[in-house]
Amino acid sequence: MSDAKLQAVLSSLPQGTRQLDALPSNGPAPDKSFVKLNTNENPFPLPPIIMQSAVAALNRQYLYPDDDNISLREAASSTYGVSTDQVIAGNGSSELLGLIYRAFLAPGDKVAMISPGFSFNRKLAMLHGAEFLEIGCQTHSLPMEQLLSGPAKDAKFILVANPNNPTGTFLSISNIERLVAQSDRLVVLDEAYVDFAPDHGLRLINRYSNLLILRTFSKSYAAAGIRVGFGFGHPEIIGRLRNIQNVFNMNVIGHAVGISVLAHRGAYAENHKHIRHERQRVTAALSQLGFSVTPSHANFLLARVPAGQDGSWWQAALERQKILVAYFPDNGLEHCIRVSIGTKEQLDAFLAAARDIVGSLNIPGTTGRGASGSARSVR
Ligand SMILES: Cc1ncc(COP(=O)(O)O)c(C=O)c1O
């Protein structure tokens, strides 16, 4: 049915908004029977003491959360040893990424990201009509020359996720410091997975005014659905971001959980131990099955699938067994899948399905269960 008014309204959208239609969507939410290992959540409940503060916050549901997230920012400032005006709080760190793009970019500007990287950035760049430069980084050190000269030299900011998503690789903080020291661009250091890594960059924050660090409570603090994120940087830059932020961007539960997590970070020791242990166990098990796993410093694994099929084939084969993993169709990751570190039971189910699939493929030199019944159809 043609709707002339709707067409007129849609055609008034700027090109950046319309271009987003071309990007792949996340697809429908899976039903609860699926084992969900595709978006790097932390699968455990909140520690009881933090859950109590979330429930108590529900009794304040009729109030707006406090202005400018001040109580949460103050709590973060004392936990992380920075001043309150060096902190911005976000409805997840992705809100803060969005603010950075909105604050710094005009159509035609350039933004540079270490690649492969967090794909949401490509969407944000497109939305703002920016040129998105993906700077390949295959080794354990930043491609300094490419970042400091050539097209990236003019980028409005440079994005480095450390540990990186989707690779799970970790760059030394001295390597990152070299970039921040030598560049006059804003360097956005996205530390979404830092609590699973050996080091972090926050100690650089008072030394370099061109460094902006992002953190989230979605991964290491099991609060993805509650949406708590932080940015740390120079007060002038943080102030500009706060200026353009939505009023009441967070909610009372996010504030309460954020403050409680900051007070009880030790309550996650077992959780983080589990993730490190399972990361190692699943790496070894996948290697035995013929996968090649990138050593990970995050709560997920990037695994190159055994020869013969690509990552998309594996994603579909696992989905038929009710296991969801992530697949990235570009940046040389066509033969990889990314698997989040879930509970032991979830990962056992994933490994059993992977064994079954490898067995049905009869790949020489692997230790799948052997073909059981008829071979699976190969797409
Ligand atoms: C590198 C990276 N940064 C930021 C985010 C966004 O996290 P959130 O908005 O939940 O804080 C993610 C989520 O997957 C991520 O992988």
Image: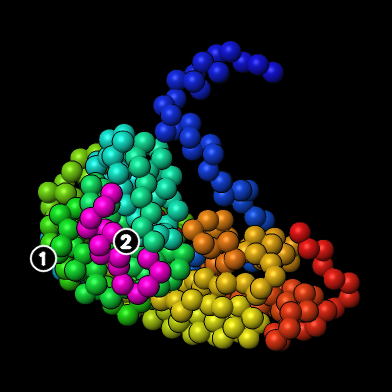
Q: Position of residue 295 (x, y in %)?
A: 46, 79
Q: Amino acid at mark 1?
A: Arg
Give the vertical position of 53 relative to 13 (above or below): below
Q: Of the residues tagged 2 and 1, which is closer to the observer?
A: 2
Element marked by disc 2: strand
- Respond yes or no on whether mark 1 lies under 8 Å from ligand 1: no
Query: Colour scheme used in the picture?
Result: rainbow
Magenta range: 137-151
Residue indicated by mark 2: 160
- On screen, residue 369 versus residue 137, left or right, reads right
Q: Nearer the viewer, residue 117 or 334?
A: 334
- On screen, residue 254 versus residue 358, left or right, reads left
Location of residue 205 by image quarter: bottom left
- Please give the name of the residue rendered at 34% of the width and 45% of the height, measured from the top-left corner: 98
Q: Is residue 141 magenta?
A: yes
Q: Position of residue 213 (x, y in %)?
A: 25, 60
- Please give the name of the residue rendered at 45% of the width and 68% of the height, measured from the top-left corner: 167
Q: Amino acid at mark 2?
A: Val
- On screen, residue 77 versus residue 350, left or right, reads left
